[in-house]
């Protein structure tokens, strides 16, 4: 029986070695850079410093806020021009202009503010290359294709002529027009 015990032990040991060997695997791997030394650069969205004309009354005459006065029925307009810097694939932006606040003024409720935007391929307001933008219609104001173009903004402050007498704004009431800011805000219309 000793030979059979030795044979059984040898078989068990051999099976153990085979099972232990089956539990370990060998494998290979390799790594390669897909895009070595890639530099990413962000685009730009900038309106730059504006060039603004003086305020004009609705008859085209100059209006000097420090010395001239308005009455119901008057409309004041000022046109400012910016050069657009809009770089970056798929860049789109929309425009807004804040209505000026006129704290502690009886005129605040009487005056109405509007802004009309126009994109032009050149700096001259000659009627060529111009596109009027209506931000209230949900239109995208401009895109990276407009880089280097000019944005003209016509700001208007109306003092409407009322249907009835309203003497709240009579008597040299003044209103300080706080800074009017034109803002270009990036949108993501092409790639939601």
Image (cartoon, rainbow, N blue to C red):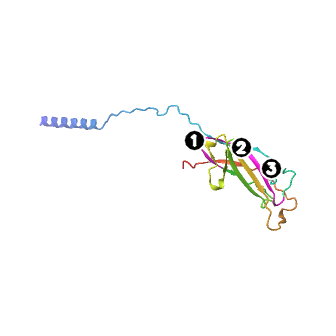
Residue 55 is tagged as: 3
Foreground residue among 72 and 122: 122
Residue neighbourhood size for the residue with mark 3, other residues' Cα within 10 Å, grouped as few (<14), some (14–19), many (≥20): many
Where residue 11 sits, quadrant-wise, is: top left
- Residue 10 placed where, x, y %? 19, 35
**Marks 3 and 2 in Cβ contact (< 8 Å):** no
Bounds of the magenta span? 71-94
Residue 98 seen: no
The residue depicted at 83 percent of the width and 62 percent of the height is: 169
Give the vertical position of 94 relative to 18 (above or below).
below
Residue 84 magenta: yes
Q: Disc 1 marks which residue?
A: 89
User: Which of disc 1 and disc 2 is earlier in sequence?
Assistant: 2
The residue depicted at 78 percent of the width and 52 percent of the height is: 77
- Residue 46 placed where, x, y %? 67, 42
Where residue 31 sits, quadrant-wise, is: top left
User: Which of disc 1 and disc 3 is earlier in sequence?
Assistant: 3
Residue 82 is tagged as: 2
Q: CA distance from mark 2 to mark 1?
A: 21 Å
- Residue 122 placed where, x, y %? 69, 41
Residue 50 magenta: no
User: Which of disc 2 and disc 3 is earlier in sequence?
Assistant: 3
Give the vertical position of 158 relative to 39 (above or below).
below
| Of marks 3 and 1, the one in the foreground | 3
In the image, is 172 to the left or to the right of 146? right
């Amino acid at each position: 029986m000793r030979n059979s015990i030795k044979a059984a032990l040898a078989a068990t040991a051999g099976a153990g070695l085979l099972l232990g060997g089956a539990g370990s695997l060998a494998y290979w791997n390799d790594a390669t850079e897909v895009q070595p030394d890639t530099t990413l650069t962000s685009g730009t969205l900038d309106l730059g410093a504006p060039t603004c004309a003086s305020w004009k009354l609705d008859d085209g005459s100059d209006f000097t806020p420090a010395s001239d006065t308005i009455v119901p029925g008057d409309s004041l307009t000022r046109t400012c021009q910016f050069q657009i810097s809009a770089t970056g694939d798929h860049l789109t932006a929309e425009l807004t202009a804040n209505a000026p606040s006129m704290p502690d003024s009886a005129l605040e409720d009487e005056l109405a503010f509007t802004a009309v935007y126009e994109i032009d391929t050149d700096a001259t307001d000659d009627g060529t290359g111009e596109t009027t933008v209506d931000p209230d219609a949900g239109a995208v104001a401009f895109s990276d294709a407009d880089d280097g173009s000019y944005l003209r903004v016509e700001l208007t402050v109306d003092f409407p002529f009322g249907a009835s007498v309203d003497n709240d704004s009579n008597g040299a009431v003044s209103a300080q027009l706080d800074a009017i800011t034109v803002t270009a805000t990036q949108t993501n219309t092409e790639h939601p």
